[in-house]
Image (spheres, rainbow, N blue to C red):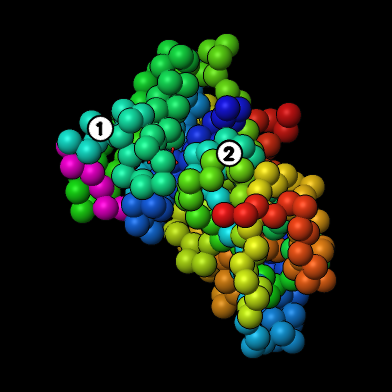
Amino acid sequence: MKSVEDLLKLKKEIQESIALREGGDKIKVVVGMGTCGIAAGAREVMSALLDELAKRRLTNVVVTQTGCIGLCAQEPLVDVFVPGKPRVTYGKVDAQKARQIVAQHIVNGIVINEWVVNK
Amino acid sequence: MMEELALHILDIMENSLAAGASLLELTILEDPVANRMIIELTDNGRGMSEKERQAALDPFFTSRTTRRVGLGLSLLRATAEQCGGSLTLVSQPGKGTRVVVTLELNHIDRPPLGDMGATIASILSREDPPEVYYYHQRGKEAFEFSTSWLKEQLGDIPVNLAPVLKWVQSHIDEGLKALYGGE
Ligand SMILES: Nc1ncnc2c1ncn2[C@@H]1O[C@H](COP(=O)(O)OP(=O)(O)OP(=O)(O)O)[C@@H](O)[C@H]1O
Ligand SMILES: [Mg+2]
């Protein structure tokens, strides 16, 4: 998955899938990317989230990032915003947990309480 | 703490975006003959006054409000100095900032470059992705990537979709692998 042909193939596929899903609010996932987050592994968390979403072709989810929010000991932090539901913050996330968050929370709507941090 | 240069690069790119930059130009030059590595990041963010610029390398200075120390630049400077190099900040208020890091290419303590594909994909994963131009030269060979080129290919498809970002990551990783002679 690296050549320009692959990119154009991907483009066509996305065009078709976006047309199917037009409308509807997006789910937002926010990864903490301050120095503390990066040093704790936030980039690997971001990569795992993108990989899992890409594999599942979930284009109705935006993954974005924020700086340090002052919970450095809990980094990497991941916030999940599902439209109409309260925000959920997960702490000490790693790549494995990030994939679970996609599978359980984003796809099935089940919050993984064990990993939630209370602010 | 930061085991890859690519993680430091992600960190200083985050600084640029925190300063409101919409354009990031990253140049990495590896010169095996001179035993030099130069990493240069230029942004069009809000820049720093001379006072801020000097303070920025002091870990007890930060414009953040969530924590009283700013670590990013101090950590990178420590890494550069430990590897026989330096970190220089050039900045002008309202114009932008340039961070220049030099290191000895063969220095035993020099962290490996690491996963630049993951770094660039991460920085582009946001609601309003910046323009990024990345040029990497090693000896006489070079690799380059730009979001303006990517957007041309994509047409009306946004850059910040997970499958597109995964493609960007592997495209850059493969490009650099070729630059390193397929190691
Ligand atoms: N590209 C830039 N443009 C404008 N100001 C910058 C830039 N990079 C750094 N600064 C200023 O220098 C300060 C120190 O940066 P540094 O990365 O060391 O710490 P930080 O970003 O504040 O916190 P941390 O990196 O630990 O999350 C910043 O708070 C900011 O005021
Ligand atoms: Mg910083």
Q: Looking at the rendering, in which quadrant would you find the C terminus of chain A?
A: bottom right
Secondary structure at badge 1 equals helix
Which residue in the protein does label 1 denote?
A: B55
Q: Nearer the viewer, residue A66 or B155?
A: A66
Name the mark nearer the viewer: 1 or 2: 2
Q: Chain of mark 1?
A: B
Q: Which mark is residue B176?
A: none
Q: Amino acid at mark 2?
A: Ala
Is B117 situated left or right of B146 in this image? right
Ligand 1 image-quadrant field: top left
Q: Who's the residue at 75% across and 75% down the image?
A: A13
Q: Chain of mark 2?
A: A
Q: Position of residue A54 (x, y in %)?
A: 75, 63
Q: Who's the residue at 62% across and 71% down the image?
A: A86
Q: Which mark is residue A73?
A: 2
Q: Position of residue B23 (x, y in %)?
A: 38, 55
